[in-house]
């Protein structure tokens, strides 16, 4: 997952711009990225000081992904005429 501009790795984020560019070339422009950092905290000793931040960002990312999935399911149900559940 890429870093947002307001996070420590934001200035070094090359993933999101790259993916936006390639998706745009195939016509996909409505993209939402879910961000999380410090994914190697707990795996690489120098990053162990960031384990709590990793856990918080991971939980936030999972919550946001679930929100997006639910919103898509509701939209799909509405488009199909079904009752969202």
Image: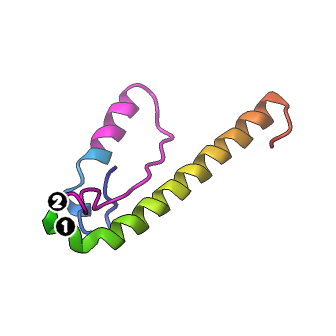
Residue closer to the observer: 54 or 25: 54
The residue lying furthest to the top in this view is 26
Task: Kindly identify the residue that appears in the image at 39 percent across and 32 percent down.
Answer: 23
Location of residue 52 by image quarter: bottom left
Task: Kindly identify the residue that appears in the image at 53 percent across and 50 percent down.
Answer: 65
Q: Is residue 56 magenta?
A: no
Q: Mark 1 — residue?
A: 47
The colour scheme is rainbow
Check the image and report above or below for 6 versus 82. Answer: below
Task: Kindly identify the residue that appears in the image at 42 percent across and 68 percent down.
Answer: 56
Give the position of the C terminus as an image quadrant. Answer: top right
Q: Position of residue 80 (x, y in %)?
A: 79, 28
- What segment carries the magenta color? 17-43
Check the image and report above or below for 46 versus 23. Answer: below
Which of the numbered marks, if any, corresponds to residue 44? 2
Q: State the SS at label 2.
A: loop
The residue lying furthest to the left in this view is 46
Location of residue 39 by image quarter: bottom left
């Amino acid at each position: 997952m890429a870093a947002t501009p307001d996070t420590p790795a934001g200035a070094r984020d090359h993933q999101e711009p790259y993916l936006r560019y390639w998706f745009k070339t195939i016509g996909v422009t409505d993209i939402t990225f879910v961000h999380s950092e410090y994914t190697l905290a707990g795996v690489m000793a120098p990053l162990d000081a960031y384990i709590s931040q990793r856990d918080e960002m991971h939980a936030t990312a999972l919550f946001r992904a679930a929100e997006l999935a639910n919103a898509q399911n509701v939209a799909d149900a509405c488009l199909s005429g079904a009752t969202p559940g």
